[in-house]
Each structure stands twice: as structure tokens, then as C-alpha cells.
Amino acid sequence: MSLDPVQVMSGQVKELKVAPSSNGDNRASWEEKEEFDQDHLGLTTKPKPVTGRRARKVEGGMFFPKPENAVTVAVSSRVMFRTEREQKVFEQKGVEEYLRYQIEHENEPFAPGPAFPFVKALETVNARLRELYPQSEELFDIVLVTYNHAHVGIRLINTINHHNLFIERFCMTGGSSPIGYLKAWHTNLYLSADADKVREALAEGIAAATMFMPEKLTEVSESQLRVAFDGDAVLFSDESERIFKAHGLDKFFEHERDNEDTLLDHGPLKGFLEALGKLQKKFYAKGQRLDCPIRTYLVTARSAASSGIRALKTLRAWGLEIDEALFLAGAPKGPMLEKIRPHIYFDDQMFHVEGAAEMGTVAAHVPYGIAQKHNPKQKSSVGK
């Protein structure tokens, strides 16, 4: 089985061609056209009336935190919702017809995509935090990121209202790279279907991953956020992975024994685990450790006795708690993840991402470290 980002549900997606703009950002060539309006688009039908939209319940004067105080999760609209039909219109008929189609269907909500259960779980945690700390801004803050023209924003807003999501922050770039905006949002995690943009975010020090849609979806908890991480090149650096790739397993074990008391350097997702840990401690402070709505997992191919001590000592030195640690000694990760049922699993190796997806887990690839030289190059897709 070979996966492309969200391709299980949407088929092959071509990359949007962009041209440099005067401010140095990449801007889609169609964005250079003059402002669009409905007459210019030549709509043949008026947008259908809204059907099935739910009223959003905002109780107690709901507020949204300042980005610097929140745990900000930026999600591409293409992994938040299913947009394969619209993508085909864009590929086959061009941007003009694509925009016309979006406006004519703007009151038809998109179906949930692979990131949807994860975002719903974030909102569940927020509801619990608001109960315990009504004035605190230490919450998850979700930003919806899209390359789309602003016209498409109406359909996205209608979709968010339909699904009763609390997403008020949008970043509609009209074809430009969103990475600069992610830095301004103090983004803690960026999820996208565009592998190139994920690599760009990682290069800027932003935790990021390419999401994949499993062929089957495992039912996940509605009351507890579950996040699973690989160790090397995800939470930790790829130092040990490099030893293994260059010199084999025996040398790897020897290296880990010799460096048992030397901390591993941090990997790209360490900061996100740290952010989760800070929110967990807010529940612990209220005596809710056993009823915490956040649970974290380390799922690693390392062996416990031969190479696990260094990983655990590193986490302890960082002041980070992992609720469950599974040292699989090279056994397949998919069956274990099927039992955990995480909302998302992060791994640097496509072999493990594909294995997780086969078992129904929503998996995300972190294109970081030496393993990328051994992985086939991912194909990019447009993060509509």
C-alpha cells in the first residue's frame, strides 16, 4: 500500500503552480487577476439556501485567547474537510470554474476530513478547561488555513457552523505560502496535505506533519484527546537513527548503552508534547489526573532493555510525562495503534504511517531526519 497525502479519499492531486510576487511570497498565478465578483464569474445559478445549519451555542460570553497564550493548532482545510470533488473541478476545468462551483455550492457543507475528529477532541478539552478555569487563555486555538481565494471562505464558514465547530480564525492566502502567517500565530502544530509546505514549516522551527486518510476509520473517543508519538526524529532528534542507518542494530545498541546518561536532543514534535503536558497539569492541579481529557503515548520501535532507558531519561529530564510508553522492539505498530485508537499518530517513516493507516489510524508523516533519505519522496498536494 502506498499513500499520498489524503489521496485515499481524493485521488492524485496536482501541485498548484505559483509565481513569485513582489513581496517575496509565492502567489498563485490566478491571484494576480483583478478582484472577482459574481458577475465576473458568470454564475448560472444562485447559491442554494442554507440547509441543515446548526445554531452555534456560545455560552457565558465565549472569548478567544491571544495567540501567544494559547496552544495554536493550524489545520489545512483539505485535511479538515473532504474536498476531493472540488479539487477535481479545479484540476479539470481551471480556477474560474472552480470559484464558480464553490460559490454555487457555498451553502452545502463539506464532509469531515481526517483532521476533523482531532479538532473535535481539542474542543472537548477546551470545554473542560473553561469549566475549571473560566478566565484562562491557556486553551487550544484552532486556525483554519487555506490557499483559497476569500470567496471560498463563505462555504468554509457555513461548513463550520453546520458542524458546530468553534473556529473563528482563518488564514486564506489566495495561493501564497502560509508559513509566515503560521509564525505570526505562534503556531504549535501545523497539519496539512501539502508535504512541501510541511517541510517548509519544519525548516522554520514549526512542528508540522502531513496527514493521511486511512482506508477505514477506527472509532475514537469523544471525551478524551489521544495523541501518539514515535520517538526518534519525532520527539527526539535523529542522532540514534543515524547510527542505526549507518552501522546497523548492534552498533546502535552499543551507542545507546554508552550514552545512556546523555540526553537526546529535541525533535520537531517535542514542543507540541510539551504544550500538551502543560494543559494536562492544569487538570492535575484540580485533582483530575485520573479523569484527564488528554492522554499521550510513546509508540517506538526501540527495545525497552537495550535502548529504552535513554529515551525515558530524556523525557524525565525535560519534565515531560508520557502516559503510556510502548517499546515494540521492531514489531509492527499498526496493531498497537488500533488498540490505542489515537486521534492522530506522528511518525517520521512512511512504512509505519502506512501500517497505521491500514489498521484504521489517522496517521501523520513528519518529514524530518535521516529516514527521509530512505523514504520515497512524497508527492505534494494543494492544501485547499
Image (cartoon, rainbow, N blue to C red):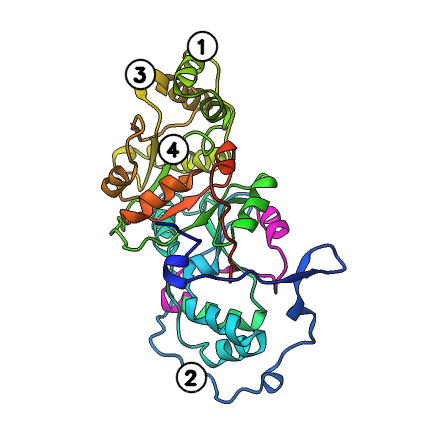
Q: Of helix, strand and loop, which one carries label 3?
A: helix
Three-letter amino acid code at disc 4? Answer: Lys
On screen, residue 378 versus residue 118, left or right, reads right
Which dot, 4 or 3, sits closer to the camera?
Answer: 3
Residue shown at 30%/36% (left/top)? 333
Comparing 2 with 141, the one in front is: 2
Q: Position of residue 266 (x, y in %)?
A: 51, 28
Residue 158 position within the rendered picture, expressed as x and y whole percent measured from the top left: 43, 71
**Nearer the viewer's eye, disc 4 or disc 2?**
2
Residues under labels 4 and 1: Cα distance?
A: 34 Å
Find residue 281 and name its label.
Answer: 4
- The residue identified by callout 2 is 48
Q: Which residue is mark 3?
A: 305
Q: Left of 378 or right of it: where is 119? A: left
Instruction: Say which label, 3 or 2, has the lower sequence index.
Output: 2
Marks 2 and 1, Cα distance to the nearest angstrom? Answer: 67 Å
**Under tag 2, what secondary structure?**
loop
Which is more foreground, mark 4 or mark 1? 1
Q: Are marks 3 and 1 in contact (CB under 8 Å)?
A: no
Q: SS for tag 1?
A: helix
Q: Earlier in the sequence, mark 3 or mark 1?
A: 1
Q: Nearer the viewer, residue 147 or 18?
A: 18
In the image, what residue occupies the spot 42% across and 84% down? Answer: 48
Q: Is residue 347 left or right of residue 303?
A: right
Task: Tell me: residue 193, above or below residue 56.
Answer: above
Q: Secondary structure under badge 4?
A: helix
The alpha-carbon separation of the residues under discs 4 and 3 comes to 29 Å
- The residue located at (40%, 51%) in the rendering is 3
Residue segment shown in magenta = 160-186
